[in-house]
Amino acid sequence: MDLLKYNSPWALYEEEIPHSRICDAPSPAEILTPAHLQRLRDAFTSAAHVTRLHRKQRNNNHVHSHMVFEEFSAVLQSVLQSEAEPAWAQRFFDEVDICGSGRLSWQQLSSYLLLEYSHRHQASVPAALHQTRPLIRHCSRNKQEPTVRVVAVFSPPPVRYVSVSKGGQLSVWDKDLRITHTLRLAGDPTEEVAHTKRFRGWVTDAVYMKNARTVAVVTDSRDIHFINVSTARAFQDFHLYGFPSVLTAACYWYNTQYPYESSELLVGDEMGGIHMLRFLTPTKRLFKNSSKKEKCTQRIYLQHLREQQSPVSYCCLQSLLQLPINRMMSAAGPGLVLASSESSVTSLVCIDLSTQQHPYVWKIKDGVKCFDYNEPLQLIVTGGSDGAVRVWPRHVTSCPLATLLGHHAAVIDVAIFQPVEQVFSYSSNVELRIWDVTTQQCLRTVRLHFPCLQETQIPAHSHFPFLLLTPPLPDDMKPHLVVGCRDHLALLSLSERHRGGGLTDAPPDPLSCALYNPALQQVVTASRGSTVCVWDLETGKKKVHISNAHGEEELSCMTLDSSQRRLLTGAQNGTIKVWNLLNGLNLHKLEPLSTAVTGLLCLHNNHIFAVGSSQYIVQYDLVPKDFQVKSDRSWKLSGLHKSDIVALAPCPALDVIATATQRGEVVVWKLETHMALVSLCGAGDTPVKDRTPVDCLIFLQHRASNKHLRQKAVLVSSQAGWVRFWSITGHKRPYGEFFAPEQLDESVLSLSSDQAQNSLLVCGDTAGCLHIWDICQFGLDVPEQSPSPPRLHCWRAHTGPLTSVEVLQTVDGLFMLSASADGSAALWTQDGGRVGSFGRGKITDAKRDRQSSLTGEQRDQSPDPCDSGQTPQRRDFECSDFETEHPRAPTARPLEEGCIPTGDSWGDRRCLFTDSVDI
């Protein structure tokens, strides 16, 4: 049994932190009421409506009619009984028509609304658990025995934890789960060996008696050990022995408003009976003091409590449950107790011990292994061996309020987190689930990777793995959950509210990739913090912000679909998702890869290819109706790749794709046959073991589509700073190569070209520099020597490595998009003029700030390109900051409030860029 592997390939999605999205404008779905939806449906199905709009309808009884935008806009005006703004109607239409077909059906509209409402509801109920990597500690003193129970001790401060092992070892922990001291239960003096009273039984449960500052430990030796925790060092105070049967569970009740009044310790046994100890003065003393010397454990025989006056009274109620009691919990008042067993007849019993009348009895087929009760919510939650979590109203025993399914093993503990009305459940296969009480949905699934887990062994758990601490708590403490597995403890922090963030400023995470969407005039950036941002190119405003797009996993790559309305993202844990770029909705989840996703591409027929840190190409067919898309792993690479695939590039004109590996191998594949067209290796005769990874791979699309140029170099790769041009039909040696960075220890991480002409090649290196090369005549023949192409411009664009560069071909000319590991993304003119940075500064009106800085005269005054014959060790000019390299570059007014200078070439109608705060 492999406990560390997932039950299904989709389990990765279940355990990640749910994503949240924020848009710059409210969703159209927020305006529509149920009455509006009914009228919309009638409009789609009404034959009269179709006739009025001169539409032909084949069957009036089915929802098959379609609408173009003009019809849809007219229907919206009629349904809303007001004039719908054209921009709002257009946005609504575009969000639904995600494929860009120009027509809508009722099925498309209803699917969109269902997804929108579902996501909004899920986002409004965030899981209380945000932490996926808990603090895990090993209790070495347990001697590999499981921890039976952990209790929290609040007095005297600071807060401490006391864990009790099955063998009777007590460990005291500080708030950071560091052991401060240990204590072992004392044994029977008659069994003293070598002057040591060794405890020889098994601990079955423990409970904290808060007002008495005592921990009561019950064992299978039919006794109770009372541990005094009123001082920094715990010690055993009393030992009550002689119970008629084995004790199995315990709970404690006292009046929180009057803690000095009498309290009750309730203990269940293996015969289904309950023993009640009532302490009259718990804050002063539990038992009558002995005349013996202090600091010695006082042993008290149970029968003696009845024979003499004592501050404690005892009574026993036998056989209340048919099987051993496995858990107990005191309810609202004295004598009111809930007890559970694995009996199908007395699975859970709620009884007032003082009257013993009219007990509530829940009967569950497989019994109850665990339960929790919350008085304010009046809810009981049970778990059992069937893996189901049941939610019950306090006074209803016949039918559960909800049955929560999802666990694939026995549920061994449950807890109700009242502040957010959520339920934690934990199964024997080390799976923690968080459920929302209201929606009855599983919000998160977390698998705790304890170091003690082994593939061939079932995890060792006690009957009480949980310790849930909820408000009220000390000022410096937040709610948290402690989970025990064998001799390890895990501490998970909880939150009582949803985390903020979105369209406002936040410390930037390193950007892992960025791309330009020409269809929607957008720029999309992705960060290592699993955040996706969509920016409007004209204004620089943030349109959509997606947090935790892949939980806490780093985003490794992304691409657009064929309609350029959907975004595909891949993460380090192998998950792949498809998003609506207009509103941030998660449209599809693709079956995860077994390794990190390193490349994605989507062809015109929504055929998706994904590669990862493995030697496989995985395919997907994107069908709109399928939220979960299964993979097709039929593509066999025939062993051509000997190492992990790290790059992927498409060439639609030639119907091929190219893959590159960690060892510098480059293979071009024919899409139609899935066969290798050509295999290329860099660095000539360099031994395989010495080859470096390919950092980036692109096709020159203009050359590939030109019948006179497609025989030339159409593929460009970067490897350890070397940029190489390859032909996929001619010689296997490079058609040209040059070293792009200024320093020998730098690399080129990203490449791009103006694909309409392929006259420029843009390189982004690890020093943060942008290099622009003239490649019009480069790579057209196999040279004897490989001189560098003319370098047109070079400037320091960012302080960190450039993870993405892209050439933007707009109506205003060519611009360069750059994204960096320093967390910033910027737009540049092709000669190095900074247009703006995304998310930085206020709106700057281009009309007001027009400058004549990008005229042809100033371009003539820019530095001459570097000599094409230079080597990496010697250059005529070095990459420098923009201000140094371009003394005649566009000048800007002093920046006010973080404004970004804007060049004239951007056009009179453009404003770049606004801060997201202004949205």
Image (cartoon, rainbow, N blue to C red):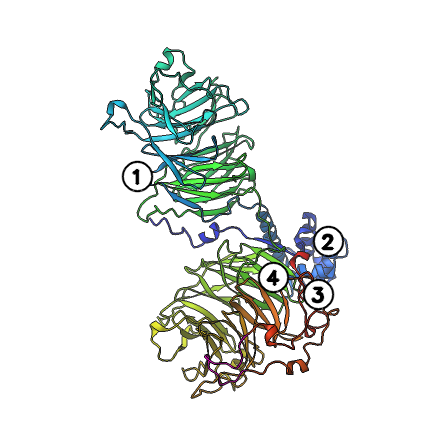
Q: Nearer the viewer, residue 178 or 304?
A: 178
Element at badge 1?
loop
The residue tagged 4 is 534
**CA–CA distance between discs 2 and 1?**
72 Å
Q: Amino acid at mark 2?
A: Val
Q: Quadrant of the C terminus?
A: bottom right
Q: Nearer the viewer, residue 601 or 683?
A: 683
The CA distance from mark 3 to mark 1 is: 68 Å
Quadrant of res 490: top left
Q: Which residue is mark 2?
A: 79
Looking at the rendered structure, the kind of residue marked 4 is Val
Range of magenta residues: 866-879
> Sequence-wise, which precedes: disc 1 or disc 4?
1
**Residue 656 in view in this figure:** yes
**Measured Cα–Cα span from mark 3 to mark 4:** 20 Å
Query: Looking at numbered disc 1 in the image, what kind of residue is underneath it?
Result: Lys
428, above or below 103, in the image: above
Q: Are marks 4 and 2 in contact (CB under 8 Å)?
A: no
Q: Which residue is mark 3?
A: 844
Q: Residue at x 35, y 73 (%)?
A: 690
Tell me the distance, in whole angstroms, between the alpha carbons under discs 3 and 2: 39 Å
Please report whichever mark, 2 or 1, sits nearer to the chain's N-terminal start: 2
Where disc 2 sits, the SS reads helix
- Mark 4 lies on a secondary structure that is strand
Kindly report the distance in space between the C-alpha atoms of the residues bearing marks 1 and 4: 54 Å
Q: Position of residue 366 (x, y in %)?
A: 40, 35
Q: Nearer the viewer, mark 3 or mark 2?
A: 3
Q: Secondary structure at mark 3?
A: loop
